[in-house]
Image: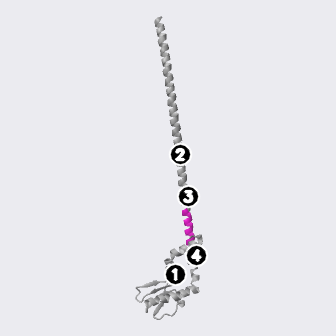
Amino acid sequence: MEIEKLKGSLLSEAKAEAEKIIEAAQANAKVMLNEERAKLSALKSEAEENVEKNLEEQRKERIAWARLEAKRVLAEAREDAIKGVIEQFFTELNAVKKTNEYKNFLKRAVPQAVKEFGKGTRVHVLKSDKAALPKMNGTKIVTDLTGLGGASVESADGKIKIDLTLETLFESRRDEIRKQISDKLFGDK
């Protein structure tokens, strides 16, 4: 019987020891589970922060792109408006050629250019503008000019020219004229 008692005692002790080991393992597993849950929660929180950060960056990027696109569209619209005014200006330039101001320009600018070159000077004008020029001795007036109007004055040897055509005068002041148009249309200062 003693063996039975010893056997029972050993089994009880083994059972008690096994329960202690199981309890310790369960406690250890519970601690590990809590640690993993905490890590998971931290990772989830970090992921949410990263998502929020990325969303905010994308929002800012899209807003910046939209602002840039709006500026581009506005600049194109302004440019189209300025081009429209310039096109209208050239369309209406034929009416300007009939004004006294245009004729006075020809009467003043052409003789001054002829004076610079002296005798033998050739003046190229539109046929319709020939009558607006004053009499200039020693100057040949040629009605072969094409374009909007004005005059082209060249020296006797043809090496030097003074271009007083309306197109050239416009081009020489293009930036200034564009700025004036912009100021009038958009109130730029």
Q: Position of residue 183 (x, y in %)?
A: 57, 72
Q: The disc labelled 2 sits on which kind of residue?
A: Val
Task: Assess disc 2: are there few (<14), some (14-19) or many (≥20) residues with their C-alpha within 10 Å of its C-alpha.
Answer: few
Q: Which mark is residue 51?
A: 2
Question: Which residue in the structure is indicated by mark 4?
Answer: 88
Label 2 residue SS: helix
Question: Which residue in the structure is indicated by mark 1?
Answer: 166
Nearer to us of marks 2 and 1 is 2
Q: The disc labelled 4 sits on which kind of residue?
A: Gln
- The residue lying toward the viewer, choosing from 95 and 27, is 27
Q: Which mark is residue 66?
A: 3
Residue at x 49%, y 78% (from the top left corner): 172
| Gap between marks 2 and 4 measured at Cα | 54 Å
Q: Which residues are magenta?
A: 71-83
| Gap between marks 2 and 1 measured at Cα | 63 Å
Q: Is residue 129 magenta?
A: no
